[in-house]
Structure formats: structure tokens, C-alpha cells
Amino acid sequence: MMNDRDDRCRYAGLDRVHAPGLSVGESAMRLRRLAYVEMRLMRLFASRVVTIADREVKLLMGRLQYEACMHADGLRARVLEMRVAKGRLDVVPDEALAVFFDEAEHLPNAPAFLAVVTHLIKPALRQAYQAYLREANHLADYPSVRLIKQCLADEIEHPTLLESVLNRTPFTDADRELAEAWQHSLMRYLSAAGGLDGTAPRSELPPRKASQVPYRIPHELTRDDSFARVWDFVKPPYEHVADHLNYMMSIRLSEINVAEGLAIVLFETQDMPWSFYADISRHCWDEVRHSMFGEAAIEATYGDRAALPMRDYEGVFAMEAPPLEQYAVLGLEVEGKNMKYPPGKRLEWEFCRDAARHELMTTFQDFDWADEVLHVNIARRQLDHWFEGGLEHIAPFSAAGREHRTAVKQRHAPVPVIPSSSSQSKEFTEP
Ligand SMILES: [Fe+2]
Ligand SMILES: [Fe+2]
């Protein structure tokens, strides 16, 4: 028996070149299941961007939903290289697996959700990827092997991140019991599916419990006390440089509202092509990042991330407006109008560079501008398909949506953005 690992300079460094491994059919079936699992995880994490109040968990959910999406995207592309027809990709590969995720969507609170994801779902996913690497022939199936190694790099990092947010999540005895009961219940559905990759022996599928009724995201703003909150901000003129910079940092911070709206668009819009979900998932994560732009810039400026407040009205609009309306308003009326210079995204960047001379905000606004160009292109592409009649006929619809957003904005008077009294600017002083 030859030992594959004896001589790393042969076979371009690949492992398991002599093992018969998995066939194309077996590999494609497993990868198709894993693509489905990652797609369901994208949905699951997106739903928690909306419903979990804890700022750190909310932000992490934004990242996890996007990385699950990227894994699903890569796996789907690979499956199509394995003699599988495109239509098969959107067929549910296993009813038991679907029921497992339908049930998981109902996980009742943040502690139970985090415990089950950290201790059951993510370890099962990591093991499924590791099993694939153990069983495949790495020479025959190298494109899959490389992709799975990339997914695994994330799946090795995610548990560390989840453990750290779990460790700071307060658990009552009742929470602990609830988490255990849910983990036990979900394990029965998972075992009926033969595990995430379907390779374990199967038990009988228990009847649906929570998922007899499909999960719906409660449309309520969830916030912890990380930041002071106001309804809306007064926009200072550009000439009031320090005030305008504070306003801009608070606007970035408040983009978590947009991310939550997009998470709802992703979760609630049914029967769209995969490219729609991939685009919205990316857009959602970008808006989570933009909120962190604000947080990091405020922290770098004042030594305290909570020195400036965030605003709520955009979040309330996102909870009230149907997905198509809020997406049309965001993509066409808000982001689309930000492309016009002056003022637009370019002027925001120039202001940070030339007037505020704030190096970190200059970097953030530079990338924010690039992201927004991408978002406008995404929105135009997706709305052309989604809106009946296409972009050509959408203007009255998006304008009505903008009026709705303005009406929400006007429910309460805006207030000036003022740094909290304990905060002092560390790195930035008006030039
Ligand atoms: Fe943004
Ligand atoms: Fe955006």
C-alpha cells in the first residue's frame, strides 16, 4: 500500500490520490445537500439580524449569513460541473433536512438560538466538510476539495466567534432548559435526515412541531443599550465641519436599520432565482459593515463608541413597508440618488478627506462609495426582474414608497447630533 503522504513533492502536493474515493454521483449529491444547508443557514442567520437585540450578536449574524451565502454559491457552481442539471439545484434534496431547518427557524430566544447553533448545527457542518475531505479522492475531485477547504477555514473560525458571544450571553435556568429541550428536539429531525450530509443511518422523521406554521420574522426594532437612540438627525451644513462629521458618523452607525430591512427582504421574498438571494445577502452584510464603519470611526474619534447616537426612523420604515417597496426605495430613491455628484457619495468622501481631514472616515467613505455603486447596480438588476413591468415602469411605485418613508421620518422632529458630555475627541480636532 502506498502512503500518499510519504513524498509531498509528488502529485502537486495532493492527498489521497490512490484512494478510490467518492463517485461523481455521490459527490454531487453530497455537495447539493451542503449547498442547501448553507442556503438555509443564510436564511436562518439573516432572520436573527432582525430579531436579536444584542449588538455584537446582530453584527455577527450579518457576517455569518453572508459567509453561508458564499459557501452555498461556491457549492452550487461546483455541483453544476458534475453532470447535474441546473433545475436540480433548487429542488429540496431531503424532506427531513427541510423540516430540520423549518423547526430551527422557530428557535425561541437568543440564548437557545446561540446554544443550538454553536453546539449542534455548526459542529455538524464542520464534521460534514471534514468527512468529505476524508472520503474524496483529492486528485479526481480537486475543485470540490479546494472549495471545501475554503469553507472549512470559515467553519473553524465561526465556532470561536460563536463561543465568544455565547459566553457573554446571560442564561437563566429556564433559558438553559429551553436550549436543551430544543437541541434534543432538533437532533431527532437531524438524525431522521441522516445528518447534514445524509451519510449517517436514518431514524424515523418525527411530525412537525413548531413548524406546522411557517416562521415569520416579528417586525419590531430590536436594540440593546449600546447606543443612545433618537428618531432622526438635523443635517448640519458642510461648513460646520465638526458637526457635519459627527452627523455623518452617526448616519453610518444607523445603517444597521438598512441591514435589518434587507434581512427581511432576503427572508420573506419567495421563489426568486438564486442570484437574488446572493445579491441581497451581500447587500445586507455591506450595510452591517457600514454600521460598523460608524461605530469604529466614533470610537477612534472619541475613545467611546457610544459617544454619538443612532437614529430609528429608517428601521421603523423597514419594519412597516412591504419588502418590494422598501427595496425599491432603498435601491432607487436613496442609494440611486446618492450617485449624483455633487453632493452624493463622492462629496461625502471629499468632505472627510479635505474638510474634516479624518483619515479613518476618509477610508470608510471611500469604500462606502464603492459599495453603494455596487448596490445601485444590484438593485437595478434585481428590480427589473422583480417589479412587474420592470424598471421602465417602476418610477411611480418607488416615488410612492419614498413618500411613505418621508411620512415616517416626519412623525417626530429631528434633533442635532451632539457628542455625549463624557466624550472628548481624541484624534480629531477641527482644522
Ligand atoms: Fe450603506
Ligand atoms: Fe448601500
Image (tube, rainbow, N blue to C red):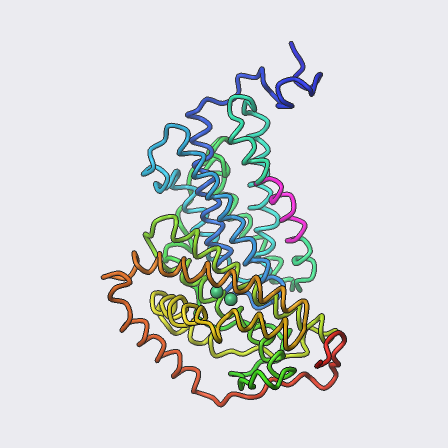
Q: Nearer the viewer, residue 104 or 204?
A: 104
Question: Where is residue 231 drawn, in percent x and y?
Answer: 51, 83
Asked whether residue 192 is in view, the answer is no
Q: Is residue 390 above or below residue 418?
A: above
Q: Residue at x 40, y 59 (%)?
A: 377
The verdict on residue 258 being magenta is no
Q: Residue at x 63, y 79 (%)?
A: 246
Q: Is residue 331 above or below residue 214?
A: below
Q: Quadrant of the C terminus?
A: bottom right
Q: How many marks?
A: 0
Quadrant of residue 92 in the image?
top left
Q: Nearer the viewer, residue 217 or 16?
A: 16
Question: Where is residue 264 drawn, in percent x and y?
Answer: 43, 63
Question: Where is residue 1 drawn, in percent x and y?
Answer: 64, 9
Which stretch is magenta?
A: 151-162
Q: Nearer the viewer, residue 216 or 64?
A: 64
